[in-house]
Amino acid sequence: MLGVYARRAAVAFASAILAATSGLLTAPAAQAAMPTPVSAATARTYLSQLTVSAESSASGYSRDKFPHWITQSGACNTREVILKRDGTNVVQDSACAATSGSWYSPYDGATWTAASDVDIDHMVPLAEAWRSGASGWTTAQRQAFANDLTRPQLIAVTDNVNQSKSDQDPGEWLPSRAAYLCTYARAWVHVKHYYDLTIDTTEKSALQSVLNGC
């Protein structure tokens, strides 16, 4: 499992170095939303390729083992980059904190005008990743996962909705807004496939049900 991940990580690292030497990392790329996940058809194929396995123990898990909200550019950390990316008319101060703007949460359809009402959700939660294979990763690999701006892994949503999701997989929790279910399932499978994470039977069944209706 780690062989595939390590090769992908090496390619990503090399690309980052090339971009940095080209002066392309002076600011995060402008984008209106999280990266578009694979299509439903591709997600169905990816889902069939995931290793089905009962989740491993959460023993040893700590959020500290997934260093997150690292500095991305200048004074901006990952959370602030996502707030800027996913919001509308977002104004940031010299420390990169969002002082105004609005954020639409696709999970529940709510709109917020205070950044404090918004959480950055890890599509595949950190604890879920730990139980699905990330316990065997290095800290650097877990950091890359927790701050991934390239895959559909990070998204700004209503804070209490994110908290209700907690570390649950789609067999246990799905967004209340039906119009977002297909995107959610596509993104979940996209991330799990990219990182070679396992999937349990209940999780797979729920994802198949959603994707078959897309």
Image (cartoon, rainbow, N blue to C red):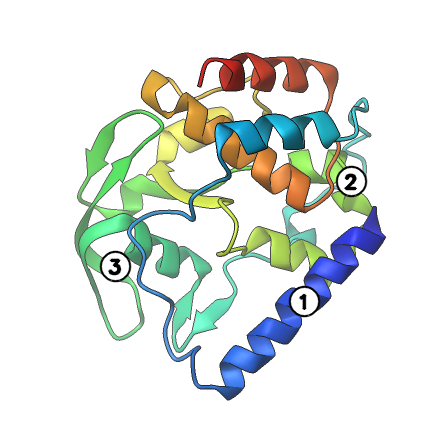
Callouts 3 and 2 close, C-beta under 8 Å:
no
> Residue at (43%, 32%) from the top-left corner?
162
Q: Nearer the viewer, mark 2 or mark 1?
A: 1
Residue 169 x/y as whole percent: 60, 25
Seen in the picture, residue 6 relative to 209 is either above or below; the reply is below
Local packing at callout 1 (Cα closer than 10 Å; few below 14, some 14-19, many 20+) is few
Seen in the picture, residue 17 relative to 93 is either above or below; the reply is below
Looking at the rendering, which quadrant does residue 129 occupy?
top right
Residue 82 x/y as whole percent: 37, 54
Residue identifier under label 3: 98
**Numbered badge on residue 133:** 2
Look at label 1 and name its amino acid. Val
Q: Is residue 3 visible?
A: yes
Q: Give left or right: position of 153 versus 26.
A: right
Q: Nearer the viewer, mark 3 or mark 2?
A: 2
Looking at the rendering, which quadrant does residue 143 occupy?
bottom right
Q: How many marks?
A: 3
> Residue at (50%, 28%) from the top-left corner?
40
Local packing at callout 2 (Cα closer than 10 Å; few below 14, some 14-19, many 20+) is some
Q: Give left or right: position of 114 versus 20.
A: left
Q: Foreground residue, 127 or 19?
A: 19
Look at label 3 and name its amino acid. Ala
Mark 1 secondary-structure assignment = helix
**Numbered badge on residue 11:** 1
Q: Nearer the viewer, mark 1 or mark 3?
A: 1
Mark 2 secondary-structure assignment = loop
Look at label 2 and name its amino acid. Gly
Closer to the chain start, of discs 2 and 1, is 1
